[in-house]
Every structure is written in C-alpha cells, then in structure tokens.
Amino acid sequence: MEEKALNPQKNTRTVAEINEKIRKGDAQVLTAEEMKRLVESSGVEVAFKEVDVVTTGTFGAMCSSGAIINVGHSDPPIKIDNAWINNVPICHPGAAVDLYIGATAMSETEPFEYGGGHLIEDLVNGEEVELRATAYGTDCYPRTQLKTNLTKDDLNQFYLLNFRNCYQHYNCAVNGRDETIYTYMGKLLPRMKNATYSGAGELNPLMNDPDYETIGIGTRIFLGGGQGYVIGEGTQHEASSQNGTLMVRGDAKKMNTEFLRGASFTRYGTTLYIGLGIPIPILNEGLVKKTAIRDEEIFTNVVDYGVPRRDRPKLAKVSYKELKSGSVTVGDRKIRVSSLSSLKTARSVASTLKAWIDEGEFFLSAPVETLPLDTKFKGMKQTEATAYVANVMQAAVTCKETEEVSAIAKRIVTKSVNHIMVVDDQGRLNGIVTSWDITRALAEGKTVLSDIVTRRVFTAKLDEPLETASKRMAQHHISALPVIDNEQKVLGIVTSEDVSKLLGRS
C-alpha cells in the first residue's frame, strides 16, 4: 500500500508516451463503442491498463461550414469584387484572389438544389468547376472580367474551414403548428406527427471528453476523410451547459467524398455533411470513465420549431437511447423520430481513425491551448422592437355551428367584419366562415351553416412574429388568421389589413 501511494504516476500516461507506442505499433486503440463495452465487462482499471486511445466520430449537416481557396493571379491581374463558381455566389473576404465558399450559399440558377456544399464536394472529388468574376479595376489590378475553369489541383490553397462544427448537443425538433414546416431540422409535419434529431450520441467526440481535457487548439483530428486540426472554440460555444462546438480546419485537397457530401434540405436550402472524429488519449482513469458514457446518459430537449422565436418551447427531455429507438414520448404522445445524421458513417469515421492510428499513419497532438469553459451564448442585440401578432390582434366574432346562415349574415353586417370563427362550447376553433361564404350560401339558398364552414384553418399564436403570420397569409392566399392558444381556444383574429397598417404596407 505504501509503495502504491508513493508512485501515483502509474495511473497516468502522456501523449508523448502514446505516440511512441503508435510508432512501435504497440498502441491499443478502441472505438468509443468498443471502449464502453470493455468498461462494462471489465471495469475502469482494466480498461485503463489495456487502452491507449479511444476514437470517436460524427457525421451530420454543418451549415457553418465552408472552404477558403486561393485561385492565383490572372494575367493581367484582377482584384476580385464579385465571384461565382458554378453559379454559386462566392464570398470575397479580402485581398485580390482569396475566396470563401459558404456551404449554404445557393446557386443562382438551381436554388435549393445546388449550393456551396455541393461545390465543395465537387472540388474535393476532382471535378472541374467554372469561375466567373468581376472587378472595378485599378492601376495594379486592371482586369474587370474573368471566366475560367478550375480543379482543386489548380488552386494554391483549398482548406475546409468550419466556424462551428461537432455540436455537443442538438435539439430534437417537432412542429406544433397546423401546417407542415421546412427547417434545418428537415420536414416537420403538423401537430407533432414526426420528430427529427441529429448527432451520434455516445460516439460524439465532445461527449467523450466533455471537460476538454484532451481537446483544444492544435488537437489533430479526422476531418472529411483527411487530417485536420481544432483551431479554437466554435461560434456559439457554451461548454458550461454542454453545448460546446469546435472551429476546425483541414486540407480539403486530401479529403474524400465518403466523408464530405453536399446536401439540400427541401424548401430550406443547401448545406454540407462532414465526418469528424477526434482521438481521445486515455491519460488517466478519469478519461476512461468519461469515454464510458452511454446513450441513456446523454439527454437533449424536444423543442417546438413551429414557434418561430429564439426561445422556442421545450416540451420534453429525451435520451439518445430513446432517440435511436425510433420514437420519443412527449406528454402522453408517442412520436416517431428519425435522424438527420448518419450513425453508420459516424461509426465509419471512428473505425477509419482507429485504423490510421493502428497503422502508424496518424499521431496524436496535445493542445497548445485549452478551450474556454465559461463562455455564454448570447442572442442578438436588437435595437428595433419586433412586432408580434399580439400587437395587432383584434377581438374575434364567433358563432356556433348550430346557428342559421341568416343569423351569421346579420352578425357580419352589425359587427362590420369579414370573418366569423366557428367554435364549440369550450371556445375551441372548429372552422371559419367569411362574408363571401355567407353571400354565396344565401344566393344558393343554403340555410345550414355546417354546409359552408371551412374546416382546414390556418392559425397564428400570440407570441408569433407578425412577419411570419403575414408570410403565412400570403402563402395560402388568405386574408386572416384566427389566433388560438395551445388548447385551440380562439383568442382573437389578425387580418392582412392589420398587418399592413403596422408594417407600413398600406
């Protein structure tokens, strides 16, 4: 006992020691899933003695992705002002011929079908692309027009640069509205008929080292099928709430499209799927315990994306074990859930990284600087007030379905309204009738209100931005939206005329 107390370093190892074992071919490497099984069967102490490195992986859509390219100087030279590659607008961050391809930038000729993510994939794949550029012309950069074809081999630099990657957590999304919506979480059916999520759960790099003990600036990683580095915390990084992200960079010329794919989300836009994996050096038994985390210990929130606000309602908390089962429970409802990321490819990332280390093709690097653990994600400071439905909502005129058409016609005249809400005895919305409906009914001799009620009604919520409500009216060619609460009770009505007055469109 005394000897053990005098030699505590036996329970630690260094990155340098692990790299030496990699050089000799003696390092023991397990994927995160294999490590969890070993800890469960043999315990922490045995796992620490037997394992040197644990490999992790994730593969999902990373909208905050892009690539920096340098196209070289033309003859005569051009100081690029505007550029397009394969008709995708390209950002010009500075200098004459340095460009940034944003993954979410969409083609001007094929919007929603082709964008920056697809362009990066094409370049990685060795395909030829068309560059067009314009400039205002200067004495030293006289050229004002440029058109040429390029491949990645013609570029001086082609670096994948992701401002925010490897999300530690991602919401599970549902839609509480009465209509389908299209988001970066995919297609969400009305009234919470489906749910979507993203992330690899227990394979996720940041869940296997949540305290950033081995992950920091300078950490060598697997990125897009090649090697890359962590260059800082990602934007919106908030480690204190386990909502960490990473900023990463890698040589895209050495990547491959098995782990890097452009994608389009219906009626949302384009993005880039990227495989990212981080080797976790097992420096101590604490890291063994961290890499033993299971899906049932990792939780995320079910969030209503039907509410178009930053502070969307959190409806439930679910584990990744539940998410991967194919359904989640929200209240007394069971909702089918599907993943937007690929667990299969995440596993391939982890196993490929493991093979690289086993074969001596990948060595670990200790961080040169740790990542912050105390940052807080702040929403945008807004100096103009946002108009909400509550700001313009008018009192609703209601009726019961048992009433006569003639009685409703009189009510429209006396109340000077064009819309009547049909409600039940508890005030819940059952339908809507308009002045046009009533006029037609009287002309056709119809007396029963139930024959003319519109059952499919598009609605709004009190805390919904007015701009969103206006867009919904325009999309469905209607002039009003009943305002309801979560129990479908009618609170009021908002009309296109109300919107026009407030937003200055009248």
Image (tube, rainbow, N blue to C red):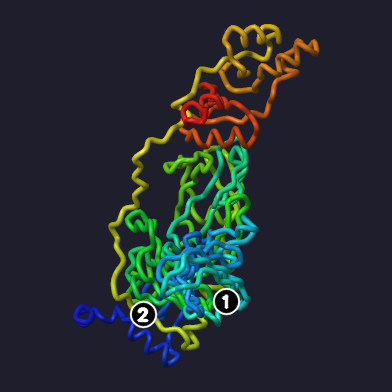
Residue at the front extreme, as displayed: 139
Whole-angstrom CA distance, mark 1 to mark 2, is 23 Å
Give the percent coordinates (x, y) of residue 255: 53, 77
- Position above or below: 387 against 327: above
Residue under label 2, please give it. 365
Indicate the secondary structure of the residue bearing disc 1: loop
The amino acid type of the residue labelled 1 equals Asn
- Position above or below: 237 against 455: below
Indicate the secondary structure of the residue bearing disc 2: loop
The amino acid type of the residue labelled 2 equals Ser
Residue 454 placement: quadrant = top right
Viewer-nearest residue: 68 or 452: 68
Residue under label 1, please give it. 256
Residue at the bottom extreme, as displayed: 24
Locate residue 56 relative to residue 5 in the image: left or right: right
Residue 412 placement: quadrant = top right
Give the percent coordinates (x, y) of residue 171: 48, 51
* Mark drawn on residue 379: none
User: Can the viewer see residue 56 in this picture?
Assistant: no
Q: Residue at 69% x, 18% y: name it.
A: 436
- Position above or below: 391 against 240: above
- Position above or below: 263 against 500: below
Give the percent coordinates (x, y) of residue 320: 50, 56
Estimate how packed mark 2 is, as few (under 14), some (14 to 19) or many (20 or more) residues with alpha carbons within 10 Å: many
User: Can the viewer see residue 241 in this picture?
Assistant: yes
Work out which quarter of the rendered image holds the N terminus and state it. bottom left
Estimate how packed mark 1 is, as few (under 14), some (14 to 19) or many (20 or more) residues with alpha carbons within 10 Å: some
Q: Residue at 38% x, 35% y: name it.
A: 385
Viewer-nearest residue: 175 or 110: 110
Give the percent coordinates (x, y) of residue 202: 47, 63
Q: Nearer the viewer, mark 1 or mark 2?
A: 1
Question: In terms of sequence position, does the residue under pointer 1 or pointer 2 come before the other?
Answer: 1
